[in-house]
Image: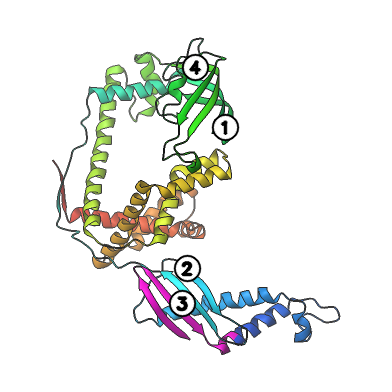
Amino acid sequence: MKVTLEKKEKNKLFLEIEVEAKTVAETYERKFRETARNVTIPGFRKGKAPKDMVKKYIYEDMLQRDVVEELISTSFPEALTKLEESVEPIESPQVEINKFAPTSELVYKATIEVRPDIALGQYKDLNIEVEPVAAVDDEAIEKEILELRKSQAQVVNVERPVQQNDIVLVDIYGEVEGEQIPDGTTDNLQMEIKPGNFVEGFTEQLVGANINEKKVVEITFPDNYAVTDLRQKQGKFDVLIKEIQELQLPELNDEFVQKVSAQFKEAPTDVADLKAKLKDVLTTRNENLQKSKNQEALVDSIVNSSTLDVPESMEKKEMYSLWQMREGQLLASRDVSKEVLEASWENWQSREDILSEARKRIKTTLIFSEISKKENIILTREEIDSHLSIYARVYGVSVDKIKEMLDDNGRLLPIIDELLSMKVLKWLEDNSKVSVK
C-alpha cells in the first residue's frame, strides 16, 4: 500500500491511497465466489456452475461496488497508521476513486477532517467577577402570582371587539405577490392577541375586529423569517374572526391559594403565606441562576483565551442538533410540509447567532476534553454506575442491563461525555475564584 499526504489545510487532510493489484484481485475473487454461491442457474447446483456462465447472472457493477467498499473500509484505517503523525478523524472520509479494475491497483483520494490542535489559554488560578442577578422584590412576586392566576383562569366566549390578550379562533388565507403562500391557508386556528405573535404587526391589526368580520392584514416578513423565500416580502392575509375569548382570572384569596397549593412542597395556608413561599422559590431560582452565570463567565474566559479551528463538519452537526431541539421537532409534531421543514433548516443554517453558539459549544467540548487529558481528570466506574443507577431504577433493571440498553440506542457515550464535562467543570471551579460584584 502506498499513502501520500498531498496537503493539509487547517483540520483537513488530503490523502492519495493506492492498494496493490494483488489485494484487489484477491478481494474481487473472494467476493465473486461469495456471490456465485447464491446465484441460481438452471441445470446447476448453487456454486457449481462455470465462472463464465455465472458472470451472465450477476450484476457486475454491484459486485465491483462491493469490492471497492470493502477495500476502502480495510485500507483507510491502515493508511492512517502509515502517516508520520497520528491523526484522529472526526468524520468518515470523502472518497474519490481515481483508478480501479478487478485486475489492477485501486487508487483513491480521501479527504478527512481531524480533531483540531488546541492551544489552551489560562484555565486555572483565574479571578473573575460577575454581575449579580436581579434581587427578588415585590414586583417579581406579583408577576409570579399573575402567572399562577393565569394557570387557573377560565376561557370564556365574549361578544365584543377583539382586545389585547384575547384568544381568537380564525380562518386565514395568505398570499404574497398574488400567489398563495404554501401552508398559508388554515381554518379554525387559535391565535393569542399579543405583540410579536406569528409575525410582528399581525395580531395588532386584529384588535377592534368583531365576530364574523373579515380583516385584511398586511405585513412585511422579517429578514430572519423561517421561510427564506418570504423574507422582506409583503404578505396579505384575509382573516375571518369566528370566536373571541378572554381569560377570566380568579380572585387572589384563600380559596385560590388552596387550588394552587399542590404546586408547592409545603402547601401555603393563605395569601400571605403564598407570597412568602413564592419568595423562597424565587430566591432558590435566583441562586441557581447566579451559579449558572458564574459558571458561564468562567467557561467563557477559558474558551476565549484558547485557540482552535472548529471543523466544518462539527459546526454543521451541532447546528442541526440545535435546530432539532428548538425548532425541527416542534415543526414535525405539527405535521408541516417537507418544504416548510427544509425552509426552516435552511434559515437556521444562515443565522450567524446560531453558528456562533454552535462554535462556542464545540470549542467548550473540545477544550474540556483537552483539559481532562492534561490534568488527568477521569471518570471512575463507580461514578458512571452511580449515575446510571438512576436510569436503572426508573426501568426496573440492573445497571449492566441499562448500560446495554443505552449502548444499543447510541445514548451511553453521550451520557458519559456529559458526566466527564460536569467533572471537568467542577475541577475548574475548584481551581479558580468566581465572585459576585
SS state under label 4: strand
Q: Is residue 193 visible?
A: no
- For the residues labelled 2 and 4, the Cα–Cα distance comes to 55 Å
Q: Main secondary structure of the magenta part?
A: strand
Q: Amino acid at mark 2?
A: Ser
Q: Residue 225: image x %, image y %?
A: 44, 39
Q: Is residue 52 left or right of residue 425?
A: right
Q: Residue 294: horizontal and vertical position, in percent?
A: 22, 45
- The residue where tag 1 is placed is 178
Asked whether 63 or 248 is in front, the reply is: 63
What residue sits right under mark 4 in the picture?
A: 245
What kind of residue is marked 1?
A: Gly
Look at the numbered disc 2 and give the secondary structure of its residue. Answer: loop
The residue to which callout 2 is attached is: 92
Among all residues in the image, which is located at the extreme top? Answer: 159
**Precedes in sequence: disc 1 or disc 4:** 1
Give me the C-alpha separation between circle 3 and circle 4. Answer: 65 Å
Magenta-span inclusion, residue 409? no
Mark whose residue sits in front, 3 or 1: 1
Instruction: Identify whether 344 is placed above or below 194.
Output: below
Residue range highlighted in magenta: 1-24
1 and 4 marks in contact (CB < 8 Å): no
